[in-house]
Amino acid sequence: MSALLEVRGLTKRFGGLTAVHDLDFEVREGEILGVIGPNGAGKSTTFNLIAGTYAATAGDVRFAGEPILGLAPHRIAARGVMRTFQHNRPFAGMPVIDNVLVGAHTRFGATLWSVVLGRSRAEEARRRERAAELVQFVGLGELARADVTTLSFGQGRLLEIARALAGEPRLILFDEPAAGLTAAECARLAEIIRGIAARSIAVLLIEHDMHFLLPLAHRVVVLNFGAKIADGLPAEVRTHPAVMDAYLGSHAAH
Ligand SMILES: Nc1ncnc2c1ncn2[C@@H]1O[C@H](COP(=O)(O)OP(=O)(O)OP(=O)(O)O)[C@@H](O)[C@H]1O
Ligand SMILES: [Mg+2]
């Protein structure tokens, strides 16, 4: 497997605070790479840097061999990097399926443009068909026409995932997708994430909950105070002394 995403020397300072410090890691094609670390470790900031939401202080990020650091978020999405947020962000007043279609437009441009350019009905029909397939894939098939405001929290999370997939990513970034879900929903989510990787889409998965992440990830990067303190197979990371310190220490403090 070759590296799809390469992160080198990535650094982000907010005033005097170094949220991400000289970070190196890579994500391979079709891989589920887990990112764990205590609160404030710099996980979401790392995502925001990769997705272009935050400007980096230093470093280099390459996607499919091309530098992406400094590009606008929509340009990074257009390259095939899609994300979900730590909190759900549905478009209220729209049915589930249309919310998913918005994901396709995020990457491929607005419907109006496709029409103006003569690109068309056929293309729109293809997207709609694909959106319907994705709604099924995440288990919301029966709710495709329902207004998003009627969805439960867990269903809203699944919608976010379908929407990100509608952009046909090669890499998808998940920020704590299991947060707030019931045990049954977590199990379902794990299956969906495995299904995404099985479609040869690489997954970069931030997760606070090691019980959720470790059985799912192919490899794990551990952050603490913005720096990488471990990187390896889930079984190696689980027993790594620095990880146990950072993790158990932080949990004990809560
Ligand atoms: N926009 C911002 N401005 C200033 N400081 C920020 C900003 N975003 C994050 N930080 C700080 O950067 C550090 C890393 O935050 P980040 O959100 O990346 O952590 P995290 O690992 O995602 O934590 P959590 O597990 O709580 O989601 C924290 O100290 C946070 O307060
Ligand atoms: Mg976070």
Image (spheres, rainbow, N blue to C red):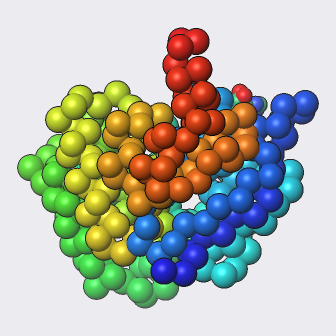
Q: Quadrant of residue 163?
A: bottom left
At which x and y percent is residue 106?
49, 63
- Drawn side of residue 21 relative to residue 234, left or right: right
Q: From where the camera sits, is residue 218 visible?
A: yes
**Which residue is pictured at 89% across the width and 33% down the height?**
15
- Measured from the top left, where is residue 202 in percent x and y? 44, 67
In the shown orientation, is residue 172 left or right of residue 37? left
Vertical position of residue 113 compared to residue 51: above or below:
below
What residue lies at 41% left-to-right and 60% top-to-bottom?
Answer: 218
- Disc count in the image? 0
Residue closest to the eye, 143 or 34:
34
Residue at the right extreme, as displayed: 16
- Say above or below: 181 vs 233: above
Q: Residue 96 or 211: which is nearer the viewer?
A: 211
Residue 53 shown left or right of residue 216 in the figure: right
Q: Is residue 173 visible?
A: no
> Horizontally, is 105 left or right of 65 in the view?
left
Residue 34, percent across and down? Answer: 48, 51
Q: Residue at x 73, y 48 (%)?
A: 54
Q: Residue furthest left?
A: 142
Front-most of 208 and 251?
251
Q: Position of residue 11 (x, y in %)?
A: 81, 50
Q: Residue at x 58, y 36 (%)?
A: 241
Q: Is residue 9 above or below residue 209?
A: below
